[in-house]
Image (tube, rainbow, N blue to C red):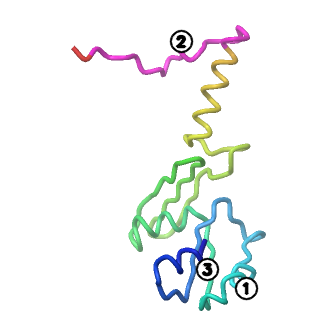
């Protein structure tokens, strides 16, 4: 992807920074990535959790919070003295509010209703009722 982007744009790139979903210190291996791209003139690679790159892209060095919600979901808040990351644990253990989570909750409600184990999606108390446009 890096090589393709450089070749399409003609950009001179010396540093590559990647925001990686689910990145931990155990699997962060910037040196291996650098070996893969150093023939393209790249001399530095930085890896960060995608919540960090989302935050920096949206707020820079300001204080605040960013919610990154797509297939997964994570929130990062930065205050004067502390930071807090919430969720971002992946589809098996978290990502509440993500696209995957919403779909799974809908399918769970449908199957629960099919098995007569509780209300279905149409009976859910948080379901938005259609409004008349007239």
Disc 3 + disc 2, Cβ < 8 Å: no
SS of the residue under disc 2: helix
**Label 3: few (<14), some (14–19) or many (≥20) C-alpha neighbours in 10 Å:** some
Image quarter (top left, top right, bottom left or bottom right) of the N terminus: bottom right
Quadrant of residue 79 in the image?
bottom left
Quadrant of residue 24 in the image?
bottom right
Quadrant of residue 21 in the image?
bottom right
SS of the residue under disc 1: helix
Q: Does the magenta stretch include residue 118?
A: yes
- Is residue 131 shown above or below 93? above
- Is residue 48 shown above or below 133? below
Q: Is residue 101 left or right of residue 10?
A: right
Residue pictured at 41% horizontal, 64% vertical: 58
Q: Earlier in the sequence, mark 2 or mark 1?
A: 1
Residue 131, labelled with which disc? none
Q: Which of marks 3 and 1 is nearer the N terminus?
A: 1
Q: Name the residue under label 1.
A: 35
Q: Mark 3 points at which residue?
A: 46
Residue pictured at 68% horizontal, 65% vertical: 23
Q: Mark 2 points at which residue?
A: 123
Q: Is residue 65 left or right of residue 32?
A: left
Q: Earlier in the sequence, mark 3 or mark 2?
A: 3
Q: Is residue 130 left or right of residue 71?
A: left
Identify the magenta region.
113-132
Q: Could you tell me residue 31's position as x and y percent? A: 73, 83
Residue at mark 3 to residue at mark 1: CA–CA distance: 13 Å
């Amino acid at each position: 992807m890096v090589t393709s982007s450089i070749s399409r744009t003609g950009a001179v790139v010396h540093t590559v920074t990647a925001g990686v979903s689910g990145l931990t210190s155990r699997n962060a291996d910037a040196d291996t990535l650098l070996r893969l791209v150093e023939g393209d003139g790249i001399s530095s690679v930085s890896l960060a959790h995608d919540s960090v790159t989302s935050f920096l892209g949206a707020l820079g060095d300001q204080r605040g919070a960013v919610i990154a919600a797509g297939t997964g979901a994570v929130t990062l808040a930065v205050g004067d003295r502390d930071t807090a990351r919430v969720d971002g644990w992946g589809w098996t253990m978290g990502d509440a509010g993500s696209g995957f989570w919403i779909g799974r909750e809908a399918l769970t409600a449908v199957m629960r209703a099919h098995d007569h184990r509780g209300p279905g999606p149409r009976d859910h108390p948080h379901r938005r009722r259609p409004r008349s446009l007239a």
